[in-house]
Image (cartoon, grey):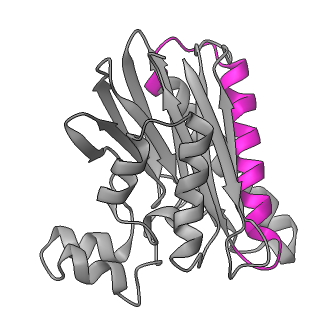
Amino acid sequence: MKTYSITDTGILREMNQDYFFASDEPVGNLPNLYIVADGMGGHKAGDYASRYTTQRIVASVSRSSGEEPVTILKEAITTANRLLITEAAEDEAKKGMGTTLVAATIIDGRLYVANVGDSRLYIIGTDGIRQITRDHSLVAEMVRIGEVGAKEAREHPDKNIITRAVGAGEEVEADFFEVELKKDDHILICTDGLTNMVEDEEICSIILRDASIEERAGLLVKTANDNGGKDNITVMIIEPFS
């Protein structure tokens, strides 16, 4: 197992509201745990939301007596959502804060993923790049029902409006995915600061380069910044069979 994570403020933003956690070692009953979150809200509230949510999920997983990974992740996300809403209610400056979330664990060659919002998890291998998560965003819904094309969606003025987030309501609805991994698979978890700036095909090309994991992650961030760097950029590369 080889993992590397990097986060960058980008060119246009003054504050980094992304947050990540990566552990190749056990967390509670999970043999490993990987989280990427992209916060939103007023001044400093988005930063707090992503960090607080991630920390609460790690704490919940650490204490969980559950055995099934989906159950463990679902309970942790539900708990984090409840606590984040309480935090927002008690501090006017944090009102309306929320965060996207991708949480993943790998058990016996199977990948388990939970997703809320428009941060993404990809699997990249010799057969190309596959987005495993589904974006919970207004424009993604428009693409799914055929109102706009994928190319048009990248430039759509509403592309950053998300339809689900941790902290957005009393109930949080996460999607869950389970994937059998192949020996040459690379896992990429990232925020939209990468995917809004770099096409999937270029992401795939960079991930499959003959370079160190650190160099490839850094090149993804550099490419996003070279293309405008309009948002915070977080990149987590996991190579489960390295």
Left or right: 120 in relation to 36: left
Q: Does residue 58 appear anywhere in the picture?
A: yes
Does residue 52 show up magenta in the picture?
Answer: yes
Q: Nearer the viewer, residue 221 or 190?
A: 221
Q: Which residue: 37% across, 39% down?
A: 208
- Relative to 187, say whether 83 is above or below: below
Residue located farthest toward the bottom when viewing the structure as drawn: 157
Q: Name the side, left or right, on which 74 lies relative to 94.
A: left
In depth, the one of 32 and 49 nearer the eye is: 32
Relative image position of residue 144 (x, y in whole percent): 18, 67
Name the residue: 37% across, 38% down.
176
Magenta segment: 41-70
**Location of residue 66 in the rendering, given as x and y in whole percent from the top left corner:** 56, 15
Residue 105 screen position, x and y as percent: 50, 25
Seen in the picture, residue 180 relative to 148 is either above or below; the reply is above
Q: Quadrant of the N terminus?
A: top right
Choose top left, top right, bottom left or bottom right for residue 202: bottom left
Image quarter of residue 151: bottom left
Residue 173 visible in the picture: no
Q: Nearer the viewer, residue 144 or 231?
A: 231
Residue at point 17% right, 78% down? Answer: 149
Residue at position x 41%, y 86% in the image: 158
Q: Main secondary structure of the magenta part?
A: helix
In magenta stretch: residue 160: no
